[in-house]
Image (cartoon, grey):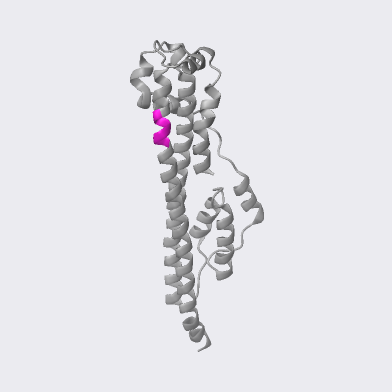
Amino acid sequence: MKRLMNMFKRKPDLKLKLRDWQRKLRQECLKIERQIRDIEREERKVKKDIKDSAKRNDMATAKGLAREIVSSRRIVKRLYENKAHLNSISMHLGETVGTAITVGNISKSTEVMKLVIILMKAPDLAVTMQEFSKELTKAGVIGEFVSDAVDDTLNSEDMEEDIEEEVEKVLTAVAGDTAAKLPEAVRKGKINVPAQKVKTSREEETIAEGVDDEEELEEVRAPFAKVRS
């Protein structure tokens, strides 16, 4: 009889908790969607800058900007993966709570625990998921974390892969026609060759001296850094 009473008491409590958990997960998904939109909007602007740099035969700048696009696309890919993990957690929580309401007790979900640990690696989600994990542990949905395992997860970094091939693909897609007509040394950004016709004396100085490439790159990198932070 006591077990039956506890079962009825737990039902509304678990349902409320589930609703609250899923609401928090949806909010994080919306944040990710906004980040993706911001990054993709900045990418469109950078593509235009790549085309302009290629027209000036300034492939060093164009290549640096292409590298920014490659980096940002990798971030977008990880953001989509994080969103998928959040949705999976929501689904597994629904199944776990549904079963608990039916049988009268809650079982720990290893799937939820794995996904929470994965999301703890994401800088934007690390703090949120640590707090979220405490709620789930207290409710009995997941077990206690092993501190060493969590620390290793938080401190692990993906090995940096060679991105030159991806950079070349971006340059070909964005400024392929212009870049293809340039000498190989120019195309690879080893040297800059002034365009035949330059409209202003400022542009003439910039191309001839080649002193503003890094400043131009920094101007374009700034919006990307802002939306990724």
Q: Measured from the top left, where is residue 102 in percent x and y? A: 42, 76
What's drawn in magenta, residue-wise?
Answer: 43-48
Q: Measured from the top left, where is residue 208 in percent x and y? A: 51, 12
Residue 169 occupies quadrant? top left
Q: Describe residue 12's horizontal placement relative to residue 145 as left or right.
A: left
Q: Residue at x 43, y 22 (%)?
A: 53
Q: Measured from the top left, where is residue 45 in percent x and y? A: 41, 34
Q: Measured from the top left, where is residue 60 in percent x and y? A: 49, 20
Q: Residue at x 46, y 78 (%)?
A: 12
Q: Residue at x 56, y 66 (%)?
A: 135
Taking the magenta stretch, the answer to whether it contains residue 173 is: no
| Figure check: 18 above or below 188 | below
Q: Looking at the magenta stretch, what is its main secondary structure?
A: helix
Q: Residue at x 54, y 44 (%)?
A: 229
- Residue sitting farthest toward the front: 201
Residue 138 occupies quadrant? bottom right
